[in-house]
Image (cartoon, grey):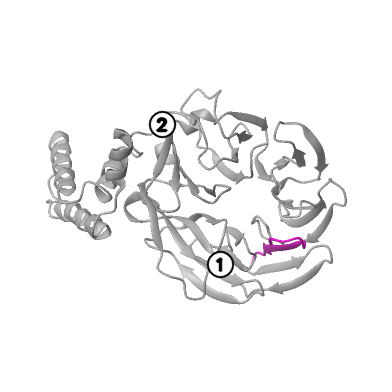
Amino acid sequence: MSGPDLRDRLRDAPVPDERGAEERGWRVVSAAFGEAPARHRRPARLRVAVAVALLAAAVLAIPATGAGAWLRDLVHPGRHHAKPALLSLPGGGRLLVGSREGAWVVKPDGSKRLLGAYHEAAWSPRGLFVIAARGRQLVAVEPGGRVRWTVTRPDPVRHPQWSPSGYRIAYLAGRVPELRVVVGDGTGDRRLDPRAADVPPAWKPGAAHVLAYAREDGSVWLAATDRHRTLWRSAPGEVPRQLAWSADGRRLLAVGGKSTRVFDDRGRLLSTLPSTGGPGPVSALAFARRGHRFALVQSGAGGQSEVVLLAAERRPPPPRRVFVGAGALGGLAWSPDGRWLLIGWPSADQWLFVRSSDARRIVAVSNIARAFSPGASGPGQAPRIAGWCCVSK
């Protein structure tokens, strides 16, 4: 084992009562500021000195890993010893990434290609194609950039999703969204529901063309698209931001800002998972490649965000924390082999590849925004992780 690897493992090793140490350290800072007189403003230099002293005292009271690293991240977010550029993808496969310039495909060696000025994109089941949205056009494009077909609508299109069979594509169109389905070769475009919510639909795994979607009252619907038949619908609730199926098609999650509803494949509500900690909303979710585990990103108190692992069950086990960082975390994707979890960290301009087996091995890559904004005059905009798919082609 190399010296840097050993340092990283020692720094990331769990410590006893890490959460408690974090909270005690925060109380040190909060209490000290709370005792300061409010009637007299100290000179700027003195205020800075007091703040530095308080932070130093808090760091001394907290272990060198975990919360101590989090306090350092408050000043300068990001993992230390991060790679300066993306040179490979742990776990192989290919990434689909969205940016201000458009949709990109990233190969296993880190090289990338701009497909075009598409504002949304998603993989086909085996990664042979990408389905993308550009203004009023739905576009099927090869990973090399060649356009195979287009469908043009009178109104803007968004949220395209390719079915697991490869023979159907669902998408939304119009300012008042209507849900539409088209055959995989671009033919047979038709309306499925004129009153859908502006939420990406989710195909149920399997050969049958069964689609979950939401309406504006927060109800979740499951439809057999070829028969144009509703299989079930849930009671109204919080309008979900995301719908996601487990790999076996036995669990469906409706992810809202404050809670996540867990349904079985018959539409029964198994449980409602509240926010895992802090007042902030859920911003991203991704099911593991096997089983009913899923990763979830949520903002919390004190300007921090966290990634936790949960299980979509009637009586789920306690959540398991994977990562805590200062600022915003955004975007999740599992590697094709299920061994790595990719976490976007816009506040630090980094991507984190976390080994899912022990959640302690982390490969950090910096300068992500600039990598996907080659013509930008400034630092660039954080890219969106759209999917991690399949074997290399």
**Residue 35 image-quadrant placement:** bottom left
Q: Is residue 208 magenta?
A: yes
Direction from residue 240 to residue 154 in the image, left or right: right
The amino acid beneath tag 2 is Lys
Considering the numbered disc 1 on the image, is that residue within a helix, a strand or a loop? loop
**In the depicted structure, whether residue 251 falls above or below residue 285:** below
User: Mark 1 packing: few (<14 Cα in 10 Å), some, or many (20+)?
Assistant: some
Q: In the image, residue 57 lies at what x, y percent? A: 14, 47
Residue drawn at x 84%, y 66% as measured from the top left? 227
Q: From this viewpoint, which residue is outermost toward the right?
A: 188
Q: Position of residue 377 (x, y in %)?
A: 50, 22
* Marks 2 and 1 close (CB-CB < 8 Å): no
Q: CA distance from mark 2 to mark 1?
A: 40 Å
Please name the residue that numbered disc 1 is placed on: 238
Identify the image quadrant of the C terminus: top right
For the point 82% across and 39% down, which residue is it? 149
Q: Which residues are magenta?
A: 204-217
Q: Nearer the viewer, residue 294 or 304?
A: 294
Name the chief secondary structure element in magenta. loop
Q: Circle 2 is placed at which residue position? A: 83
With respect to residue 57, does 224 lie above or below?
A: below
Where is residue 239 shown, x and y percent of the image?
Answer: 59, 64
- Indicate which disc residue 156 carries: none
